[in-house]
Amino acid sequence: MLASPLVIVNHIAAFGEELGWRGFLLPLLVEELGVRKAILLDGILWGLAHAPLVCFGLNYAGNYPGAPWSGMLMMVLFAVSIGAFCSYLTLKSGSIFPACIAHGALNAIREAPLFICVTTYNALLGPKPSGLIGMIGFLVLGAVIFLRPACGTDEAF
């Protein structure tokens, strides 16, 4: 995890996503819907945009129950929770760069848990960050950010 911010290629790819999702779309959604609904819709759309990648086995690979539909649903859940954190970083800082760093670091470490798995793993459960086990912390963080009083009243963070 300490080396992940140094993997520049992840930050370059994350910059493109963050520019579109948090730099362009999020401010438009906040203006139209308010902060809470904007964060939620931005995350849902971001997750759905990953559906083709899920079908090709990038984010959720292998033989898992309900594939590929359950993988797409998990990707939406993951994107909403991570998106809440990236949206918070963007709205709080007024810049997409903190979200780019967080997103790039997550992309860099997403495969690391597989190095400790000597047998098969369940794509929906984990241990990758996009599985339920690996996602627990992100779900809690996303819920805290999403349910903050400032978020609920659509005030600025």
Image (cartoon, helix red, strand yellow):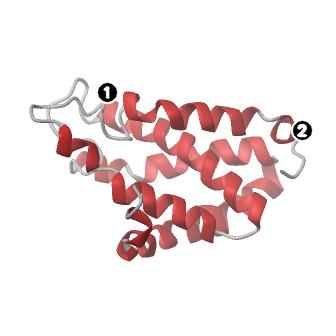
Mark sitting on residue 91: none
Q: Point out residue 55 in the picture as x, y percentages from the top left corner.
A: 25, 46
Residue 15 visible: yes
> The residue tagged with tag 1: helix, strand or loop?
loop
Q: Earlier in the sequence, mark 2 or mark 1?
A: 1
Badge 1, how many Cα within 10 Å: few under 14, some, many 20+? some
Furthest toward the left, the residue is: 119
Residue at numbered disc 2: 153
Task: Examine the rendered structure and indicate whether residue 30 appears above or below residue 98.
Answer: above
Residue at numbered disc 1: 125
What is the spatial separation of the Cα atoms under label 2 and label 1, in whole angstroms?
A: 34 Å
Q: Point out residue 110 in the picture as x, y percentages from the top left corner.
A: 33, 50
Q: Nearer the viewer, residue 104 or 19?
A: 104
Q: In the image, what residue occupies the spot 51% across and 52% down?
A: 46
Task: Examine the rendered structure and indicate whether residue 13 appears above or below residue 2.
Answer: below
Q: What is the quadrant of the N terminus in the image?
A: bottom left
Tell me the kind of residue under disc 1.
Leu
The total number of labels drawn is 2
Task: Examine the rendered structure and indicate whether residue 129 appears above or below residue 156.
Answer: above
Furthest toward the front, the residue is: 2
Q: Point out residue 123 in the picture as x, y percentages from the top left corner.
A: 25, 34
Disc nearest the viewer among 2 and 1: 1
Furthest toward the top, the residue is: 65
Residue 28 visible: no
Q: In the image, what residue occupies the spot 56% across and 40% down?
A: 81
> The residue tagged with tag 2: helix, strand or loop?
loop
Q: Point out residue 42 in the picture as x, y percentages from the top left corner.
A: 61, 50
